[in-house]
Image (cartoon, rainbow, N blue to C red):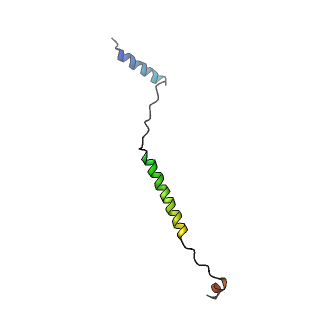
Amino acid sequence: MTTEREFEEWAEKIRRVRGQAPAPTRRRKKYPLWVPVVLFLTGLAIAVTIANQTQQQPEPPSRPLQEFLQN
């Protein structure tokens, strides 16, 4: 004798064979809210540091052409 559970399993098997099975659910990894915030702030801090370093580098003193030619 067939049980009710077997009938349900048969229906699921038939759906799978016909390609009508529900798509497997993909569980998306949930990160805490602070993770993207920290990553953004870290990138921003790195960009600011690089920008400040490039601005603070002194330019080599420009020497007049005659002084350059004499040396």
Please determine whether, in this image, residue 71 is positioned above or below residue 43. below
Q: Residue furthest top?
A: 1
Q: Residue at x 39, y 16 (%)?
A: 7
Q: Which residue sits at x=42%, y=22%? A: 13
Residue 12 occupies quadrant = top left
The C terminus appears in which quarter of the rendering?
Answer: bottom right
Percent of width and height locating residue 69: 65, 86
Q: Nearer the viewer, residue 9 or 69?
A: 69
Residue extending farthest to the bottom is 70
Return the x and y of residue 1 as percentages of the image width and height: 33, 11
Left/right placement of residue 34 relative to residue 68 reads: left
Q: How many marks?
A: 0
**Residue at (40, 18) in percent of width and height:** 10
* Picture quadrant where residue 32 is located: top left
Can you give x and y, in whole percent of width and height, for residue 56 in the image?
53, 69
33 and 65: which is toward the camera: 33
User: Residue 70, image x and y in percent?
Assistant: 64, 88
Q: Taking 52 as reference, is 39 above or below it?
A: above
Vertically, is 41 above or below 33?
below
Q: Is residue 56 left or right of residue 13?
A: right
